[in-house]
Image: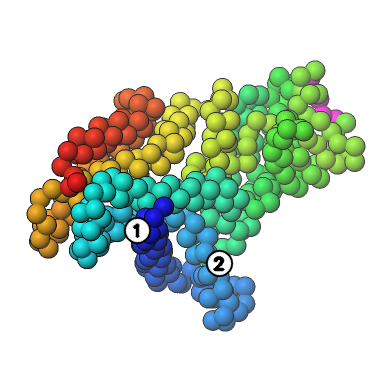
Amino acid sequence: MNTFDRYLLFRYLQTVAVFFCAATGLFVVVDGFVNLDSFQYAVDKQGGGVVKLFALMIDHYFFQSLMILNLAGPAIVVISAIVALASFLKNGEFHPVLAAGVPTYRATISLLLGMCIVNGVLIANQELVLPNVAPKLQRKHGQTANTAQKVDPQFDPKWKMFVSGQSVFPEEKRLHLPQFRLPPVISPNQDTLIAEDALYLSPTLEDPQGGWLLKGVTMDLEKISLSEVGSEVVIPQPNGADVFVNCHLTFSQMSRKTSNYSLMKTTTLFQRLQEPYGSVLSRRSMLSHLHNRLTTPLLTLVGLYVVIPLIIRKDKMSNMQQVTNIAVCMLVLGIVYGLAMGSGFLGQSGIVRAEQAAWIPLVFGSTFAGWLSGVVRT
């Protein structure tokens, strides 16, 4: 990289940081003003003053900023490229480079590198950060990460076991006062397991048999009628008070607030799709989200090569012409991303296949960017 490349890269990353701070700040001001009463109520309930109020709001919006980065990041990546290119043209900083015989696409190669760096940050945020702080992102204003949430009773997809409870605690992955109603294939008498708490144990490489550990079962375990299959599903623990249930219901399925696909790792989505359970609508939504997650970084890179010909055009550049080019560029990008959103809707509704719906905008955008390459200034 030469001096100009480093200069353009720094300017681009600086613009990305400014836009992210502006988007986060705007969200915090508007959302904090609207929900100030909720924070104040939580502070009054816990006991505290202004310092406690600000500490609660800072804790809440710090984690919300990670979600803003995930949602607004792809748009910020492309808009920052527009601003960086427009500012360089306005200040006449591109003319010496082009006059020296450097091709336009070579002169802007550092923007591609900058986009790859920011996309890498977005991917790390999606795969490593958001899944680990998901309980903190699913709380309401003024709540803590371990505030009880409503349970959505579910049937286990494999054994048709009905699972319910009083409340769920996301941070601990705990179901309070659970009830596991055993089907006839497991318990001929259709017994119901009632316990004080149930902890979800995720499958691991050492122990691929995930399930629920019921702690403090309130009934006599010796009186539970189990079939031959049931003895492999319901496993009493040595302490005589706990029971492990090999249930295929995950913790995220027990509450709508904890089943957000955007907070799951890509590997988790793959595992959920490979399971032969779940409704058609749910599987289609997961598949659409998975393909969108794979195509979004590529779509932002395509957006760069749509932006460059529309901003750095062969036409003679006046200040008014530059404003017009920016407006046309924003309009074209709006059409491309509108096509992506509409295609995603068609994929989720089942009108077209989910994978086709996700990749069609990328194919269209790439073709359009190649067609525009003839109008770029060289």
| Viewer-closest of 167 and 188 | 167
In terms of secondary structure, where does tag 2 sit?
A: helix
Query: Residue 122 vs residue 145: left or right?
Result: left
Quadrant hosting residue 26: bottom left
On residue 59, the disc is 2
Secondary structure found at label 1? helix
Residue 248: image x %, image y %?
A: 65, 30
Percent across and percent down for residue 31 are 40, 66
Q: Read off the magenta span.
A: 223-227
Q: Is residue 224 magenta?
A: yes
How packed is label 2: few (under 14 Cα within 10 Å), some, or many (20 or more)?
few
Amino acid type of disc 1?
A: Phe
Q: Is residue 179 left or right of residue 354?
A: right
Residue flagged by tag 2: what amino acid is it?
Answer: Asp
In the foreground, 95 or 55: 95
Asked if the magenta segment contains residue 33, the reply would be no
Residue 230 appears in view: yes
Q: Which mark is residue 58?
A: none
Q: Residues within 10 Å of mark 1 (few under 14, many from 20)?
A: some
In this view, the residue in front, 226 or 36, is 36
Which is nearer the eye, 255 or 309?
309
Q: Is 100 placed above or below 297 here?
A: below
Count of marks overlaid on the render: 2
Say which residue label 1 marks.
Answer: 4
Residue pictured at 58% horizontal, 36% vertical: 268
The figure's colour scheme reads rainbow
Write down the quadrant of residue 243 in the picture. Answer: top right
User: Gap between marks 2 and 1, in whole Å?
Assistant: 40 Å
| Residue at figure coordinates x 49%, y 57% from the top left | 66
Give how far across and how far down residue 60 sits, in percent: 53, 64
What residue is rendered at 32% in x and 56% in y? 80
Instruction: Please tell me which of labels 2 and 1 falls first in the chain.
Output: 1
